[in-house]
Structure formats: structure tokens, C-alpha cells
Image (tube, rainbow, N blue to C red):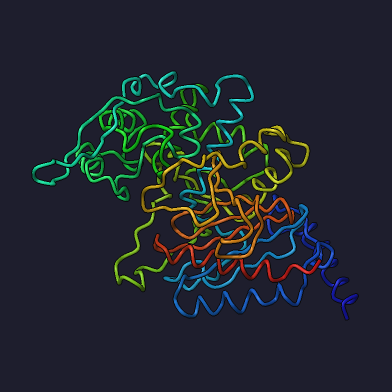
Amino acid sequence: MKGFRNVIWSLLAAFCAVAGTSAADLPSVAPEEAGFSSERLARIGPVIKGEIEKGQYPGAVILVARKGKIVYFESIGQLDPASGKRMTKDAIFRLYSMTKPYTSVAIMMLMEEGKLRVSDPVSKFIPAFANLQVSVPTTDPYTGATRYVNVPVERDVTIQDLLRHTSGFVYGGFTAHAKVKELYAKEGVDWKDVTPAEQIERLAKVPLAHQPGSTFEYGLSVDVLGRVIEVISGMPLSQFLQERIFTPLGMTDSAFIVPKDKLDRLAQPFATDKATNTPVNLLDVTVPQKNDAGGAGSVGTASDYARFLQMMANGGQLDGVRLLSRTTVAYMTADHLGPDTKFSGVTTLPAGTGFGLGFAVRRETGRFEVTGNAGEYYWAGAAGTGFYVDPKDDIVCVWMTQGQPGMPRRYDRYLFKQMVYQAIAD
């Protein structure tokens, strides 16, 4: 029976190589050829369908590759719940923070060309950040009230700080720093509905939430990296990514806008979030944004993202195209948070996890709430997308849904990952 099943999988893989779900798909093999159990992989579909039936999300696209070969690639549920259209493997998703790895790889490509060092101060490229201050809370000894004073930075914000989110730049809507939150709102600091110049001008007016290098707090750091890339390259971030990453890797559906001829492939969320009964309002990717947000603005497919991740898993190259050296990939995917690093903000890292240059990095096999290995790196997007790369087991996983940002999305991703790892059979 197993031999017959392998023949069937091989025939399907051969068919896909000719017909293809997309010209950019990685090659496919029978699961057993890559150390997976077909029977155990088959458990994934019913579990995901069960979550869809509960109203957790409208639909999903799931891709699992091992040793550079796809072993599981399925679309489940609805692409658009309003029309009832079925989910397709070539569905296009809003990636939100899964844009950050693209921007991080781009900055490291410029590093390899000698155009920057990760220790360079950001002000070398963006002078507006030359004299930043830090907002520090103090307690009035007589009243006990909290007051905030601005103090000079102890050192400059560096490129490395931006890559690992230790810059002191935060997300105004999520930071626990009350004064910085207030000032972000007052100055209109955001990544949406502002031009690149406006974003930098407003951000430079507000003090940092933390001394540079002292505290991990997820925020606008990678948006600033995007502005650095634009200064160095002399082109918009979207153009740089298109010319230097998307086109060379054959990522044909990756961009910062969905063109008209692809709109029927754009995945949509439910109109209303089940948990909060509030409307779901995601980024309108059908029209150009005022700036190419390096931390949140891109769209793409599971196939495209798998190609990007396989490039990383291969040590910086794919199909004869090299974007980074093996040593740079190893450097990026190592933990860059020291033992004295503090943690703040809503976006926290799970136990046993650090952060590299663009990715969360798993420090330990244990303590983490879902199966995996020390050394894996991963990240996710607010609207329901996520990925994992596991160098030890040579696995790339891509998970795509579209829904209301929030903690339920983490549950979705971890449930998927759990189902993938239980299917490993070698």
C-alpha cells in the first residue's frame, strides 16, 4: 500500500511540475521521500476545517516543504466569505509584519555590498535622528505621581537596533509607555497614511521609549530600515525589493499593491470579528499607499513566501540566484538579544525565544509552547499569516489566513505547526 501511495504522490508531483499551481512553486515529492507520513499529514485538513467551521477564519493556504521539496500544499475554506468563493493555492494575502523579513534581508544585502555596517548610527543616513532623547518615567517623592522627563540617549540608535527592535521606536497603539503613546498620537506617528518624509519628521519629534540597545519592544524600527534602504539605493523600497529580491527569486505575486488583474485572488476576512462583534478593517492593498511600509505593507502568496524562505534555508541562495552569503544568513538567524535585554510592549516573545536580525529565534527546544527545535526562526503577520524555518529538521512552513489581528492568530499558527511536526516520521 505504501509503495502504491508513493507512486501516486510521484505522479502528482510530476503533474504539478508540468501544469503547476504557479510557475514559481518549489518542486514537490511524496511525503515519505522527505521523511513525513502521508497518513499523519492527512490529519491537518480535518483539524483546519474544524477551525473554519467554528468561524476562526474563512480559509487557509498551507505549505510545508522539507529539504527544498513541497510535501504538503493545500487550500481550505473560502477565499472570500462574502461571495463564497473557494480558497485557492494562488490566493494573495496581506502580509503585514511578514514584510519585515524582506526589509531585513534587503538591508543585509546592502551591508554585504559595503554600503553600511550594522553598527552604523541611523543618523548617518537619516540626519533627523541625530539628537534623539529618551522619555524616562520618574516618581514624585511627595505625591507618588508619575512624571516623565527627557534625557539624552546614552548612545546612538544603530542599524542593528532597528533589525532586532531595540531602538526605542515603538508602535503608538501598543506601547505601555504612557507618555510616548500620548506623543505618538499627538504628532500622528504611524506607518499608514503618511509619506516617507512625514513619517521620519514626526518620529524624530518624539522621544524614544527606551535607551537604545536596552529593551526589546516591537515597533516601527523596520519602517525606519525601509527609509534607510531608500536613502542608500535612491529608489522606493517597493522598487528595491522588486528588483533585488522578488524578481530574482521568481516571486511573481509579491508587491505592495494588488493589480486589477489579480484582485479576484485577494483573500478576504469575515466582515465582522466573531470574538468582538466589530468590523474587520484590513489594509486596502488595492490602491497605492503613501509610503512603502517596510514593516507592514506587502502582499504575496504562500508559494512566493516559500521561495523566499527556502532561499534563507539554503544559506542565501535558490535556483542559482544568491542574495546573501551563508555567513550572513547564520548571523541574521542567531539571537541578538543579550541576557540583560529587557522586554516591553504588547508583542512579547514566548519563553525560550530571542530575536535575530529580522526574525524571532528559538533558543531552546523546551519551554516553547509548541513542538520544534532550538535554532528555528519564524515570524508572523497581524492579519493571520505566519512562517517557520527549522534548520535542524530542514523544514519550511508557510501558513496563510486573513482575519482580525489579535491573539487568536497565534493560536491558529501554533495549531498548524503542531500538526506539521506530529507528521515527521524519520
Can you tell which quarter of the image residue 185 is in? top left
In the depicted structure, whether residue 350 falls above or below residue 323? below
- Residue at point 39%, 51% (across, down): 284
Question: Among all residues in the image, which is located at the extreme left?
Answer: 142
Query: Which quadrant, please, contains the N terminus?
Result: bottom right
Can you tell which quarter of the image residue 65 is in? bottom right
Left or right: residue 407 compared with residue 24: left
- Residue at point 54%, 80% (across, down): 50
Question: Among all residues in the image, which is located at the extreme front?
Answer: 141
- Residue at point 49%, 80% (across, down): 53
In the depicted structure, whether residue 251 falls above or below residue 52? above
In the depicted structure, whether residue 228 falls above or below residue 290? above
Front-most of residues 239 and 369: 369
Count of residue discs:
0
Query: Which quadrant, please, contains the C terminus?
Result: bottom right
x then y, percent, for residue 277: 30, 72
Front-most of residues 331 and 116: 331
x then y, percent, for residue 110: 58, 26
x then y, percent, for residue 296: 44, 45
x then y, percent, for residue 232: 50, 21
Front-most of residues 227 and 303: 227
